[in-house]
Amino acid sequence: MTSTTTITSDHLKAFASTVIAQIENEAGRDARAFEQVFIEFCSEHLHELNQMPEMEWVDYQRAGNKTQPGMLVHAWGTDEHQRLHLAAVLMPRQGVAEANLPYVFQRRDIGDTLQKMLNVVQHMQNMGSLPDGTAPGVDEMTDAIKEVLGQIDPEIVLHLFTPGHFRGTIPSLTMSGVAIASYLHDIEWLRRALEDTPGEQIDFRDSGGLPCLVATFDAEGEPDVLLTVLPGEFLADLYDRRRDELLRRNVRIYLRQTRKVNREMAESARTQPSRFVALNNGISAVAAGASFNSDYTRIETLDDLQIVNGGQTTATLHEVWKDRRRPVNLADLKVQAKITIIRSDTADGDEFAQKIALAANSQNRITMSDLLSGDPYERSLERISRERRYTSGGVQTGWYYERVRGQHAGLLAADRRNEKAFPTDQVIDKTHAAQYLLAWHGRPYHASLGGEKALKTFKDDMRRAAGDVPLAEATEEEFDRVVGLAILRREADGPIAAQGTMKPPLGHYLLAWLAEHHSGDIDLLQIARTGTVPERLLPIIQQITPVISRIMRTQPAAVAHESERPKRKECWEAVRILSLRGNDANPGNLRDYTRQDWQAALIWAEGKRNRVLRERLLRARKIVQTGRADQNRDFLKATMEEAIKKGFKINLDNIRDGA
């Protein structure tokens, strides 16, 4: 059996460059660590497949020395099965030129970083606490580790993310009394997850093909549901090489041999391999294509095989096959399989695959949020965003809705010219859309729970309102409202960034306050159509943001951790009654320069033969967006004066320190 794939190194290099630039841009905008944004970026795909819980950022790092090993965890979470998930990001030790992307890590790099993650758990097991454990969020993480280690069969799942690349098998880690599962999510894994491109073709012709019974044919007479048996060694080897890609449609993460059903399965593989096919339910899979012998009794090739049910079986076989102490020969083991062919040109292919996954997993409780990105509301927003165009400053562009986060990065990796139609700062992913809408409707405390929790809350509300009727498709007006909120939130980037930490919840509370006090004066549809926030709102946003920030950080006082306060309804009750008066008022209604001032100047400068001025305008826009206007007032004033002298028109009457 052989396999082939056709992804080129140039394509992966372009993809890596685009993703890193996008993460750096978002991290710089929100003044957050690259690692935090990268974990959020990557983990959404694992959330959707129920292979990772909502993760809490912690950034716990300790250098190793002679008496203490190095330790590293960037985020943690516990899932519904009480497994502890730890995540970390592996970055090159020094900068990498774009021409050398993606950086290729060695097996030792991967093993050392995974071991640092596991050292955190081992230190907790041996000492009961962590050194220097006073950093934000560490107390909650240590409590979670203690709780998991106190179970009868504790399980730890390590997720190592990297914008680099790794070729090979990740090292296996062990810990006494604890089941450890390790996963590497590198740039190639991310590319496949985002682009959903066809995977490898598996060729069975060397072994005479797979025995096959065609259960049904499609309307054109082509086989579309196949029954077969797969060699156990083939499945184990395929999992070893393509673990995440093979299971990306599976809605369950591997539960390890500590679960009773998996222990029994492993024992069956060890002691009765020839009877495994009789004792095991087998797998359900989908493939993008297949070829057969002349009478359809043998499968010769399969394209992009994806397991939708049977991940537990496949992973268990891989574990006993790779067991260092007692490796199992799987030559005589067979696994029954039902394979549905969903060709790449099938209009509803993804939705059909998800229905198969849901039906195949019906013996377990699968929430609809596991399959969230396939609902009609999400798909209609995606479709509308690809067709809708907005004109701002005489330039027509679109707002790109990401049904699966990272689609925009894949679009630009395929062709950088797509950025003209869908600029990088005009991307809305579904979690942000849900948070904007929750905040606008007076629930910033729910929006502040985190992307996935906010999305689930928003969709649960929609389903309750729909009752027994399926969710309806979104309208163009609904999408325009989301775009209007995104523009309003984007224009507040500077004032929010100037407040330092806790930027995402501050953005939610600002939107909620504006809706509470000014919703009658704010036309979201008009903001979407023009791409600009009305002049009367700009000084209000700049004045109220620091006031909201002060209250949001201190209320309710009974909550010990500052980061937890915005998640409480009491915090919103304290913020909603704020008004601009006294020392917070601005009698002259003056404002500082805003992002849209500099964006208008950049549009004016487009095509003009003054590269130096354009670079200064780009720098000025970034200064304003990242909340550094106070430290750069002289530069901003001088740059605007130069633009005006060259012909740029702007009303400076309401601008403090205007040229």
Image (cartoon, rainbow, N blue to C red):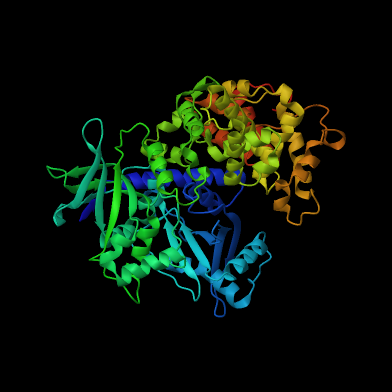
Quarter the N terminus occupies: bottom left
Q: Residue furthest left?
A: 294
Q: Is residue 646 above or below residue 59?
A: above
Q: Is residue 258 above or below residue 301?
A: below
Q: Does any portion of residue 352 appear in the rendered image?
A: yes
- Residue 618 position, x and y percent, is 55, 35
Residue pictured at 66% horizontal, 44% vertical: 448
Q: Does any portion of residue 657 appear in the rendered image?
A: no
Q: Nearer the viewer, residue 364 or 6?
A: 364
> Which quadrant would residue 315 be assigned to in this image?
bottom left
> Which quadrant would residue 558 be assigned to in this image?
bottom right
Q: Is 402 left or right of 199, judged from the image as shown? A: right
Quarter the C terminus occupies: top right
Q: Is 187 left or right of 71, judged from the image as shown? A: left
Residue pictured at 48% horizontal, 49% vertical: 42
Q: Residue furthest right?
A: 582
Q: Is 352 left or right of 233, judged from the image as shown? A: right
Residue pictured at 45% horizontal, 66% vertical: 260
- Residue 642 position, x and y percent, is 61, 28
Residue pictured at 54% horizontal, 53% vertical: 53
- Residue 56 position, x and y percent, is 60, 55
- Residue 259 position, x and y percent, is 46, 65
